[in-house]
Image: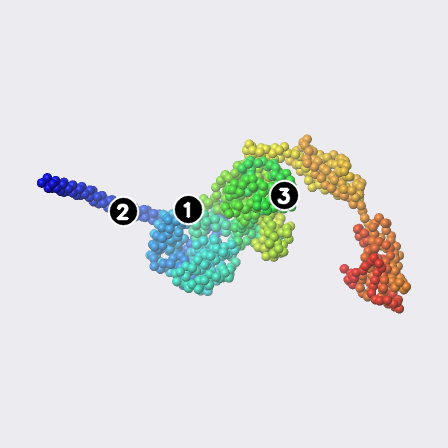
Amino acid sequence: MSENYRSRTERRKKIQEQQQSSSKEKENMMPRKGFWKKFLYTCLTLGIVMLLFGAGAFLWIIKDAPKFDEKLLKDPLSSKLYASDGKTLIAEVGTEKRDKININQIPNVLKNAVLATEDARFYQHHGIDVKRTLVAVWTNITSGTSQGGSTITQQVVKNSFLTIEKTPTRKVQEWYLAVQLERKFSKDQILEMYFNKNLYGNDVYGVAKAAERFFGLGPDELDKLTLEQAALLAGIPQSPNNFMPTVENNLDAAEKRRNIVLHYMNRHGYISKSEMKKAQSTPIKDTLNIQKATSNKYQAFVDTAISEVQEKTGANIFEDGLEIYTTIDPEIQQVTEDVLSTNDYINYPSNDKLQTAIVIADTQTGAIKAIGGGRKYQTGKFNYATTIKRHPGSTIKPILDYGPAIEKFKWSTGHIIKDEKYQYSNGTPIRNASHTYAGNKTIRDHLSWSRNIPALKTYQAVGAVYATDFANSLGFPITDTQKANESNAIGAIDAASPLNMAGAYAAFGNGGYYAEPFTVSKIIYPDGTERNLASSKKKVMEDSTAFLITDMLRTVVDSGTGTMANVRRLDLAGKTGTTSFDKSAIERYGLPNDATRDAWFVGYTPQYTGAVWTGYTETTSSDDYLGSRSVQFSKLVFKAIMSRVATSTEKFKAPSSVGKLGKEYYVKGGEKPQIPKTDKPTNVQAKYDEASDSIQLSWNYTSESRSETTFDVSYTVDGNTTKLTYTSARQAALQSPVKGKPYTFTIVAISGGTKSNPASVSITVEERKEVPNSPSNLQAYFDKNSNSIVISWNNNNAITQNVKFTVSFTVNGSTYRLAPVSESQATLSNPEPSQTYFITVTASNDAGTSAPAATSVTVESDIGGGGGVGTDLGTSSETLPSTPR
């Protein structure tokens, strides 16, 4: 009973618990249903709000979109380039650079190449390829890289109405205008616009002009385009400056781009795989027929300005109707072109492979005043001033060695480094160009005479990382891969152009501020919008570093390797640089061991900076190198231009951060130079004057000291030193020197109470030797008993003259010569019967040979013995040519 009761009680309790649990679940479910209802309502509301917001944003963006002006699709506006005065028109570029064609003139092979590469679904979409756009957006978000998704229609819109800037606003406007364009024009009309509006590099605008320039095909000859040529044309517009095939350095990149286009054509079914491979294997040079372009005035500068505008703004300079205000000074540009392209200033050789290029820039701002792109530069050709990457040679030393050292260690210009036998860290020997060592000298002296070993020591002390960062801050490009090469310290790096060298050196001339050289100060768009393109200045070194380098470079042009470039009325600082060929090139082309590959001069005043390079475009023969004359061209070009265009005689002024001790400058708070010694005489020479029987001494002397300088002159002979004179002149004389003995002369300069190191020269006056007198009383007779010709003569010379006699004789048309003898006689044994012997005897010593004495003798016919000519014991004969030489 009690058990049944407990069972019923437990069952009721369990049912109650289940009912309570069910009730709680219902209570819990009611809020969940309410949550989802609220969530869906909220999402719907947000969706409507976002849709309205998006629509509003879209309308707000497109309200500022450019008006759909059909004239801009067909009638592009030319752009005008003005000189630095803002008034002088130097060039107008635009419509005159194109040949318009219609769609029917475009061959299918070219259409297919463009469609496969740029817009495979061109004939299916309505201006926007949604699938391609979504893929591009997703790629941009996930990879962080910029991927193109523009259709051909969008590209036409962008080139006609919009700027190149990549912003969401511009993209929305591009979509909107693309749809508008599709509504108003057919697909073929849009494709025709695309072909006529594309830029193919520099001044080549439109596909017809490109076909003419690159392949020599006129507008009516486009049906002759090969598959390879069509693929090249289709690929160029992606990056015209990098793929334009008129530039030699672009050919590799252009060929790779062409092969990518061929791959797309195969992928989209326009060509077979075999056709693709055959076309890809065709060298790009075999498909080209480059035509000469017509040039504007100042073409090298104009080409550079066009490229600069395109790179900085993406504007289509050939149709956007820009007003471009450049930095050119027409007078300086004209002088530059005259110096490079005529022989009125420099007598250039006839070898057209010799090139010279220069950039002249404003030292204070970086504004480029003139560009010499090369001798007889033509548009579309390689611009050697802005594009080359050559070894800078010793012009790198202020940038990579001494500049960083002064900035890091506060060295003075009198810092001492020992020039001695040395090697790179890997054990490779390094030598100076002179193959000599100067010992302990100041960095001023080392830089003035361009010694390599002190430069390497300086670079190693600074460290590659610090030195490279310093050079990069001056706009000189050194990559991480190149950084590890210690020979960078002496300029063995393919990175230098006149453009970047001018920019780097200008930073020394304007107190340590770097401004990237530029050709365009501003542009004005047709709607009046103005955009500033001038470079801003950035402080990259202390003013003390800049001034100490400048002062050392003054010495280079005043008395070092750069004197030939000096313009005395200007406060000029500068540096020379040369590079040599490697041994393999010397052997391959038969070049002299001292042949020069590159020659540089980079110099600056407070007003202008100029960088000049001279070299051969390529070396393929024994004539393609810079010799002793042409290696000077870079200095002569600089001087010819700067002496005519530099108008300011302003001086570089020492900043308050530097001090001076003697002739050396130092950074306040840094290393001070040692008390300088008086400069020693230079170019000491000793010559014997026979007329006065004296040794004439002369020397040069230059010093910044205003103190009077005198010279203590002495000489040493046989170990004894004797004072010769004490004089303020630059010359002295020693009368009646003993002949045959070495004399060493020493000259010490004395100024301000201090003495210089001695300068010396040695000379030995040799005893005068005279050419011996000719033999006299020469006699010759045939001795039948001994079957020999006996020859004798008189010696008319003193025993001390060390004379020897040479006997020559001619018989049967052949000439023989006996070995020289000291005696006055000789014998010829076994002469040929019935022959006449013509005999000459000369006397000779170290001073020369006398005139010959001559005689003849005829041998009797009835003598015995064998034939042939003999000589007496101790002599020999040799056959001489029958015709004297």
- Estimate how packed mark 3 is, as few (under 14), some (14 to 19) or many (20 or more) residues with alpha carbons within 10 Å: some
SS state under label 1: loop
Among numbered discs 3 and 2, the one appearing first in the sequence: 2
Residue 641 visible, this angle: no
Among numbered discs 3 and 1, the one appearing first in the sequence: 3
| The furthest residue to the right | 785
Query: Where does the image place residue 579, in percent across and percent down from the top left?
Result: 59, 49
Q: Residue at x 74, y 42 (%)?
A: 762
Which one is nearer the viewer's eye here, 569 or 545?
A: 545
- Estimate how packed mark 2 is, as few (under 14), some (14 to 19) or many (20 or more) residues with alpha carbons within 10 Å: few
Rendering quarter of residue 658: top right
Q: Which residue is mark 3?
A: 421
Q: Amino acid at mark 3?
A: Lys
SS state under label 2: helix
Rendering quarter of residue 395: top right
| The furthest residue to the bottom | 862
| 562 on left or right of 776 | left
Q: Nearer the viewer, mark 1 or mark 2?
A: 2
Q: Which residue is mark 2?
A: 47
Display coloring: rainbow
Q: Amino acid at mark 1?
A: Gly
